[in-house]
Image (cartoon, helix red, strand yellow):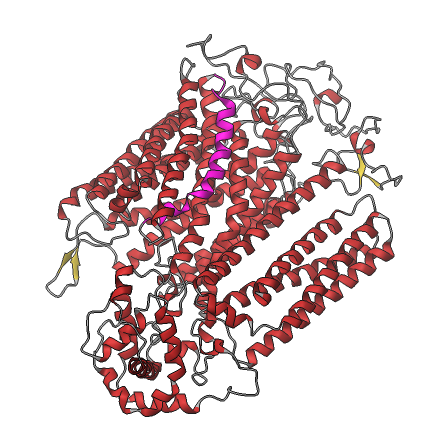
Amino acid sequence: MATSHSVTVDDPHAAHGGDGHGHEEHMLVGHDGQLHPSRLQHFFVSSEQQFEASKLGMWLFLSTEILLFGGMFVAYGIFRVLYPELYEQASLQLDTVLGATNTLVLLLSSLTMAWAIRGAQMDNKKVLVGNLIATIVLASGFLVVKYFEYTHKFELGIWPGVNFELDEGTQRVSDLNGAVALTPLFTPASEDEGAPEVTGATEDAEVAEAESGALGAADAPLTGEDQAAPSGDADAVPDSPEATGASDAEAADLAASGGEGAATGEPAAVEAQGAGAALDAAAASDAAHANSDAPGELATAGVETEHGDDHGSGHGREGEIFSNRRAGIFFAIYYVMTGIHAIHIVIGIIAIGFLVFFAQRDHYSSVWYTPVENVGLYWHIVDIIWIFVFPLMYLI
Amino acid sequence: MATLTQTPQTAPAPAARAYPVGHEPVHNYLREPRPADDVRGLARAWAWVKSWALSVDHKRIGIMYLVAVSVFFTVAGLLALGIRTELFFVNQYSDTGAVIGGNIMGPDTYNRVFTMHGLIMVFLFIIPSIPATMGNFLLPIMVGAKDVAFPRLNLLSLYVYAAGASIALWSITTGGVDTGWTFYTPYSKETGTAVIAMALGAFVMGFSSILTGLNFIVTIHKMRAPGMTWNRMPLFLWSIYATSIVQILATPVIGITMVLLVMERVMGIGIFDPALGGDPVLFQHFFWFYSHPAVYIMILPAFGVISELMGTFSRQRVYGYRAVALSSVAIALLGFLVWGHHMFTSGQSPVSSVVFSLITFLIGIPSGIKIFNWVWTMYKGSVWLKTPMLYALTFLFLFTIGGVTGIMVGALAVDIHLHDTYFVVAHFHYVMMGGTVMAFLGGIHYWWPKMTGRLYNETLGKISALLVFLGFNMTFFIQFVMGSQGMPRRYYDYPDMPWLEPLHQASTIGSYVLGLGLLVVLVNGMLSLRKKTPRAPGNPWGGATLEWTHTTSPPDHHNFHHTPLVTHGPYDYEVLFQTSGDSQRGAPVPIVEVGGPQEMDQEIDDGTRQPDSAADM
C-alpha cells in the first residue's frame, strides 16, 4: 500500500510553487507522499489556484459587508427624505473637526496597510511589521476619538431613539411615550384635509395645553393596550398655567409639523379636549395613552417639567434638535452605523494583531502573503464605508 | 496547467466485484480515520465523535447537516400537525365566551406553535436543506475537486448554524415567539415573547448561509476539474451557483434588519416604531428584501435536483441545457426585484405595486422555461419510474400548481382579495413543500446510495412517494378553496365560517397521511442502514455526472483517486453508455459498475494520485 513516490517533473506542486521572483518556496512532504509547497493545502492543485480562491472569497465577503451597511444607508436615506429638518438640526450636533480627524486617520491607516502589503511582497519584514503596527496605532486612535465623541454626547443626553433627552426637562422621549402622538407616515389624504389647521395663536395654546396634559401621563405604561379614551380628561389642563409656559416652544414646533400635512396626532389631542370627537384608530389609541391616567396627576407633572431642566446651559445643549421629538431616530441611525463600523474597526485591529504576530515569526514572504492581502482588502472596505458615513452624517 | 498524459488502462476493474482493488469500502469517507484496535469503549466512541465533529471533509459536513435538518424538519412537522389538529373542529364557547370544547390548545399557544412552525421550517430546515446537505456533499465531487475551497470555513458554517439554531430553539424555553415568522413591527416590538432570541438566532444562522454560499461560489469558479467548462457543469451546480449569489447578496440585509429589530426592543431606537416617528413599512421592505430572495434560496436548489433526476431517469440529455442553466441565474437576479409583492396591502405607493406586480409576472418566464424543458426531456425518453423519479414527477405537478397560483396572487387586484388568506398559505406550501421538499426527498433517494453506500427498499420508497403525494394534495389543495372563500391565515378558530369545518377536517386528515408518508421515508432510510442491506453499486442509476462515473459508493476520502479529466457534458448518456432515450425506448437501463478509472474517460496525472490506487500497484 504505502508505495514511496518520487517527485516527477510535471508535478504541478513543484512546477507552480514559486511566483517567478526567484524565491524557492519551502517544500513539505504531504500525507500522500508528495512534495508540495508548505502553504499549499492538499485540495488545491496549485498555489495560484489557492491564492485566487482566497481572494475571490474575500471579495465575496466584502460584498456582503457592503450590503450589510447598505441596509443602514437605506434607512438613513429614507428618514432623510421623510424628516429633512431633523437631519439639518441633528447634524449640527456632530463634531465635524473630530469627524474629519478620524477620516484622515483612517485614510492614513489605509496607506500604511497598503504599504505593509508592499513590504510583504518585497520580503521586507521591517516594512511589513512596522506598517502593520502603524495601522493598529492609527485604528486605535480612531477608536479613542470615537470614544470621546460618544461620551460627550451621552453627557449631553443625546441617546438613540426613545432615550433622547428633550428640552422639556430631563424627560426622555420614553417618558413621553404615548403622549408623543407623532405623525403617522402613511395617512390617507382625506384625513389630512379633515385635520384642523393648527395655526392660530389660541389654537397654539390649546395644543400646548393638551401636550402638557399628555406629559402628565408620564406614568402611562409603555405598552398599555387600553383603547378607551376618556375624553374630557384634558379639560383639567388649562388649570395649570405652568404647563402652558413650559410647552410653548413645543407648540410652535408642532404647529410647524402640522403644516407638513399629515398632522392627525396633534389635532387629535385638541379634539380630545372637546367631547371625544371621532378619531382615526391610530390617533385614538395614542390619545388613550395620553389620557389614561387620573387627571389629578397632571398638575404635578406640569411642575416637574418646569424644574427638571438642568441641561439648559453650559453643556452645549443648543439647537432646535433638543425640541425635535424625532431626534432619537437620527441618533439611532448615527449610533448604529458608527457603532457597527467601530465593531469592524475592532475586528480589523484583532486581525492585524494576528498578522503582526505571524509576521514576526516569518510566516509571510513574497511567495505567500495571502492573509496580509485579504486583511488589507478588509481594512480598505472599512475605510471606504467611513468615507461615505462621514459626509452623510457630519457634513450634509 | 499540468501535462496531460494518458493513463494506461492495464488493470480494468474486475466485473465481478463492486469495488476495484484498492477501492474497497474501508477507504471511503464513512470508515476513516479509525482508531487503533486497542482503543476501546468510551475512548473509541469519543474518537468516533471527534472524527465527525472536527472533520473538514465536505461529505461528512453534508451528512451532519442532513441529520440536523431532518431533526428540525421533524420538529416543525409535528408542530404543523398540532396546528391542523387544532383546526379540526370549530371551537365551542360557553355563554361567557370561554372555550369549552373543540380545541387542544389555547389561542396564545396556537400563535406560538404556528410561528415556531414557520420559523423552524424556514430558517432551520428549508434554507439549509438542499444546499447545505446535497450541495456540500455533491458540489466538490461534481466539479471534480477534492473539497470545497475553504473546508475549515465550511465546518465553521456548520457550527455557526448549530449555534444559531440553538439560540432560536432556546427561545422556546422562554415561551417561544408569537409574531409569525415575519416579525412584523410594531407588534414584534411590543409582544412579550422571546423575539430577541429568535432574531439573534436568525442573524447568526445568516452567517452560516453566507459562508456556505461563499464557499460554493469560489469552489465553482476556481476549482473545476480540467475540462469542466461552464457549459459542462451539471445543472445542479448551476442552480447552486445561482442560489449562492442570492445567499451572499440578500442575507446581510436580514442580518442588519434583525440587528435593528433587537436594538428596537432593547434600546427603543425608534426607526421601526411609529410611536416615535419610525416606519414599520420600512421593516417590511427590509424583511422582504431578504425574504423574497430567500424563497429562491429555497427553490433554486430544488430546480437543480429535478434537472438531474429528469436527465438520469429519462435516459436523455436535459433539453435546453443552456436555457435551464441561465434561467436559474435569471431567477436569482429577478428575485431581488419582486419583494414588494408581499406588501400590496401595506400602503406602499400604487406605482411601485404595479411595477412589483409586473416583475413578478416576468419571473414566471424563467420558471416556465424550466418546466417546459423538463417535460420535453421526458418526451420520447425511456422514463424509469424509480422512487426519485416519482418524487420528481410529484414536484413537476405540485410546483406547476404552486407557480401558477403565484402568478394569481401576484396580480394586484386578485391579491387584495386573497391577501393573508389560506389561498396564500396553500400557494407557498405548494412551492415550498410541493417544490423544495419533494425535490429534497427525490434528491435524497437519488443520492442515498452515493452517500451511504446502501440501497433502500424500492417498494417502501414508492409507497412513501404515493402517500406523500396524496397526503400533500389533500392537505393543501383544499386550502385553495378555503382561502378563496375567505378563511384568513393564522386564525385560531373559524366560528363565523362553520361551513368550512368539513374542509378543515379533510385538510387535517390529509396532513396525517402526509406525515405517515414522511415517516415511511424515515423508516426506509433507517432500515437501509442495517448491516444486511445490499451494498450499492457505484452507479445504480446510470448517471453521467462525475459523482456517479468517477467515484465509489460511498466516495473515497479524497473523492477521486485521480483528478478527473472531463471530456463530455453532464447528460451525454449516449456517449457514456451507448444508450439514449430515443433509440433505447423500453430497453432496460444498465446498472453501471463504477469504481476507479472509467474506460471512456481520459485521466490526468496531476501528481495527486493516491498511493493506494490500483494503477500504481
Residue A72, compared with residue B27, is above or below; it is below
Q: Nearer the viewer, residue B72 or B271?
A: B271
| Residue B594 in sight from this viewpoint | yes
Identify the residue at horizontal 57%, vertical 82% (top origin): A316
Q: State the quadrant of the C terminus of chain B.
A: top right
Identify the residue at horizontal 62%, vertical 57% (top origin): A385
Q: Nearer the viewer, residue B81 or B567?
A: B567
Residue A171, compared with residue B131, is above or below; it is below
Residue A379, compared with residue A56, is above or below; it is below
| Residue B516 in sight from this viewpoint | no
Magenta stretch holds residue B222: no
The rendered magenta stretch, by its main secondary structure, is classed as helix
How many numbered circles are shown? 0
Q: Going by the picture, which residue comes out furthest to the top? A: B583
Query: In the visual, does B548 lie left or right of B34?
Result: left
Q: State the quadrant of the N terminus of chain B.
A: top right
Magenta stretch holds residue B340: yes
Q: Going by the picture, which residue comes out furthest to the left? A: B95
Q: Which residues are magenta?
A: B316-344
Residue A141, compared with residue B542, is above or below; it is below
Coordinates of residue B70 in the picture (x, y in percent)? 44, 43
Query: In the visual, does A332 lie left or right of A46?
Result: left
Coordinates of residue B361 in the picture (x, y in percent)? 37, 36
Indicate the quadrant where residue B170 lies: bottom left
Identify the residue at horizontal 45%, vertical 34% (top origin): B302
Indicate the quadrant where residue A256 lies: bottom left
Coordinates of residue B510 in the picture (x, y in percent)? 26, 38
